[in-house]
Amino acid sequence: MKKYSIFFAFSLIVLSYSAMAAKISVVKNNKVMIELEGESASPGSEFFVMNPQNKRVAIVKVTQAKGGRAVAEITKGSAKVGYTLQAKSGGGAMATSQASGGDNYYEKKLSQKMHNGNSWGLVGGYLMNSMTVVTSRINAALSGSGFGALGYYDYAFSPDIVLRFMGGMETFNVAGTNTAASPANCTIDCNVKIQYASLYGYGRWNFMQGDYKSWLGAGVGYLYPTSKTSTVFDPNELGANQVFTVALGTDIRTGNKNYIPISVEYNLYPTTATVKANIITVRLGYAWNL
């Protein structure tokens, strides 16, 4: 019985070592190069990354496999050179292509700065506001500008599809002249000034990858006034609003874990018989990959 126990323990040690024979040789641009050391892998295979204490610290997904090496994206956690790999259950490895490839091939693959998973960032915004009010006693085209400061979180479903949640404070500020024949409420100085607590949610499609990740987005926003004054409306009439949002942006990579987000957004208020309003916003900030 003792001999069987020793044999069983020895077998576990051998299997454990075999499961973690592959190791990481390079970490770059949120990707890793894997020295397979006789293990097998194919695009789509997933591995746990094990630190020297044999603790799982990350998950990687193979994108390229060739000539005893593989390139994988870090989908969760972080990895370091020398960490070993363990096949993830349910992501069975397939046979590796035996085609030969040199270091230039792998350097090229590692340098392709693609999907970086979830991220969060801070952005400042310059808002170009406009509003048109037409009633029997008011005819005013109002315009102005404001500023905003928001934080956001990006949840990546895939390298191409991302869901963004954004919140912060923004200012809607417009003014103009009432040209109605019998003006009411305002004559020369017609204005609307609102401080909003803003929440946005929209989907992003990354149509271009690389150092300049470009995207299109669409969604909705919820604007809740925290302070408001107006010579056009009774301030009590200025309540919360929804806006419909379309956006175009670019994420400019500055390092493995950081990028500069730039975007232009068009926000349209629901149109009524008497009021039309919209906001064009230019946003610039700094962000971190998770």
Image (tube, helix red, strand yellow):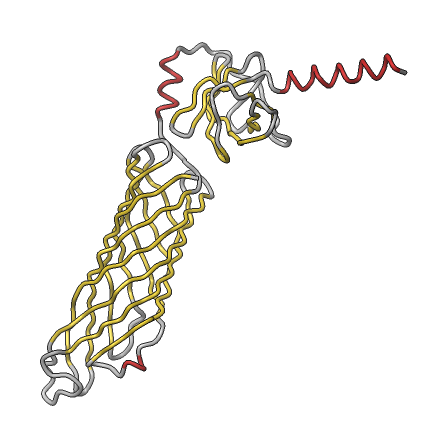
The quadrant of the picture occupied by the N terminus is top right
Q: Quadrant of residue 215?
A: top left
- Camera-side residue of 179 and 5: 5
Q: Quadrant of residue 147?
A: bottom left
- Camera-side residue of 66 and 53: 53
User: How far across and how far down the image is residue 185, in percent?
Assistant: 18, 86
Q: Find the residue positioned furthest to the bottom.
A: 182
Residue 13 is left or right of residue 195, and the answer is right
Q: Residue at x 45, y 40 (%)?
A: 158
Q: Residue at x 55, y 29 (%)?
A: 46
35 is higher (above) or lower (below) than 119: above
User: How far across and how far down the image is residue 203, in percent?
Assistant: 40, 51
User: How far across and how far down the image is residue 105, in percent?
Assistant: 38, 16
274 is higher (above) or lower (below) than 283: below
User: How far across and how far down the image is residue 208, in percent?
Assistant: 32, 37
Residue 285 is left or right of residue 25, and the answer is left
